[in-house]
Amino acid sequence: MHTTVGILGGGPAGLLLARLLHLAGIDSVVLENRTRAYVEQRQRAGILEQTTVETLRAAGAGERMDREGLVHHGIDLRFDGRSHRIGFPELTGGRSVVLYAQTEVVKDLVALHLAEGGPLLFEAEAHAVDGADTDRPAVRYTHQGREQTLTCDYVVGCDGFHGVVRNAIPEHLRRTYERTYPYSWLGVLADAPPVHDELVYAHSGRGFALASMRSPVVSRCYLQVPDATHLDDWPDGRIWDELDARLAADGSRPLHRGPITARSVLPMRSHVTEPMHWGRVFLAGDAAHIVPPTGAKGLNLAVADVLVLARALTERYATGSAELLDAYSATCLKRVWRAEHFSWFMTTTLHSEVGQSPFDTRLQLSQLDRIATSPHAAAELAHNYVGLPVGLPGESPSR
Ligand code: FAD
Ligand code: DHB
């Protein structure tokens, strides 16, 4: 089989890329190693930056998001027993975010692609990319028990952090930058109305907590926990008690409790692979970079990479120019490193390490107080949260 663009991975990055290329008249094949049900139910991110929202709309995948997504104009920062609202539109020239779960984005893109797009193969496991530096790279994969080969003009690795496409870049040319954090998140989904109409990010002496939501009747909450935490140690009552203790602030209410329907422990990690392009192979999304989830950047970074890449491939086939493709890695990495910094900043400012010194805690509280009281500091947080420029040609770089 031959295709113009071989896309490995059917997460948000791969599915959106396939959709944008389809709209530009460029064919692709998507290989996804999991089942459709699995990718549609994998609980992950929830916050969409405005550019992500606009991209999904322009791709024809915005109808349900516009109906069911919840527009959020700010967040609540809690620390030292007090609550401070950071309002986005007034600090960012009118920008906001939308709460619409990654599971729903994936369902919408899968349905669209199966109805209108090219091949999207589930349970198709890619093993390797050969000839990345030739004009006919080939993907070796297994589908329905048979080893097969897909030849392509270009191959894009949208295969996440554990993917294989990264290995197509020769080891001596590949640089990785990594940081791990000495704590994890316990994430839960509960049939209970959210405690607040915006997200609450809480710094507390007991560790970090985040109260998010999936709908007016479903809560999504996270607690900082030690690495290697066992879910058995966290029955429902303990989770609710801990959320209440960490989220408490002057005038706040206890959470509405309800049955917890899903729970998992997520490690926290920062990682960047450079370059994101070699020969005819490109990396997009988690395949190239991971951020700790505290700033809600992971999914949005994946969408931004794909936007830049789709524009570059469209230009390549419309005019023959590979200029934008050649600039892809540098264009994306500028934004990626900014998001790496913001995610690290949010994580290290809001979490407490075991044995953290009182000095470090005072620094965190001082920084949070600065954000709560200085419009300049609040604006910097707000601009990063609603999303920085993607790096498209002609886009204003100064947001
Ligand atoms: P992925 O969604 O990982 O998609 C990669 C796809 O490639 C997967 O479907 C995988 O099955 C497939 N694949 C892998 N290897 C192969 C192969 N060899 N052959 C074929 N297919 C392959 N971000 C936030 O902002 N907030 C959050 O709360 C949050 N929670 C998260 C929780 C978890 C457990 C994880 C892992 C991530 C979380 N993220 C969160 C990050 C966010 O979900 C990701 O940044 C986003 O999914 C990136 O999309 P992607 O398409 O690049 O990668
Ligand atoms: C969600 C996750 C995040 O990491 C975050 O910063 C905000 C919201 C969520 O899953 O809703």
Image: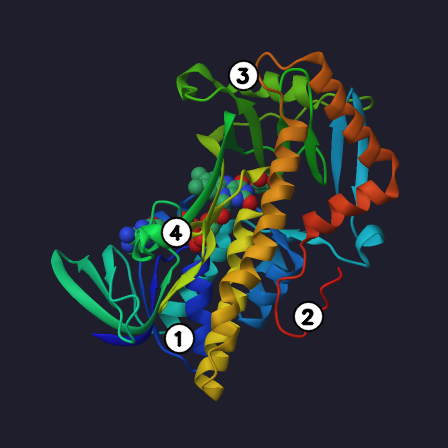
Q: Position of residue 119 (x, y in %)?
A: 30, 70
- Secondary structure type for disc 2: loop
Estimate the spatial distance between the alpha carbons at disc 3 and disc 4, rounded to whole Å: 47 Å
Q: Circle 4: is it few (<14), some (14-19), or many (20+) Cα within 10 Å?
A: some
Query: Residue at label 3?
Result: 237
Q: Position of residue 32 (x, y in %)?
A: 31, 57
Query: Residue at label 1?
Result: 116
Estimate the spatial distance between the alpha carbons at disc 4 and disc 2, rounded to whole Å: 29 Å
Give amino acid for label 1: Glu
Discs 2/1, front: 2
Estimate the spatial distance between the alpha carbons at disc 2 and disc 1, rounded to whole Å: 30 Å
Query: Residue at label 4?
Result: 174
Q: Circle 1: is it few (<14), some (14-19), or many (20+) Cα within 10 Å?
A: few
Discs 3/4, front: 4
Q: How many marks?
A: 4
Which mark is first along the chain, 1 or 4?
A: 1
Which mark is first along the chain, 3 or 2?
A: 3
Give amino acid for label 2: Glu
Which quadrant, please, contains the N terminus? bottom left
Quarter of the view holding residue 113: bottom left
Which mark is first along the chain, 4 or 3?
A: 4
Which residue does the image show at 48% across and 79% down from the upper left?
314
Give amino acid for label 3: Gly
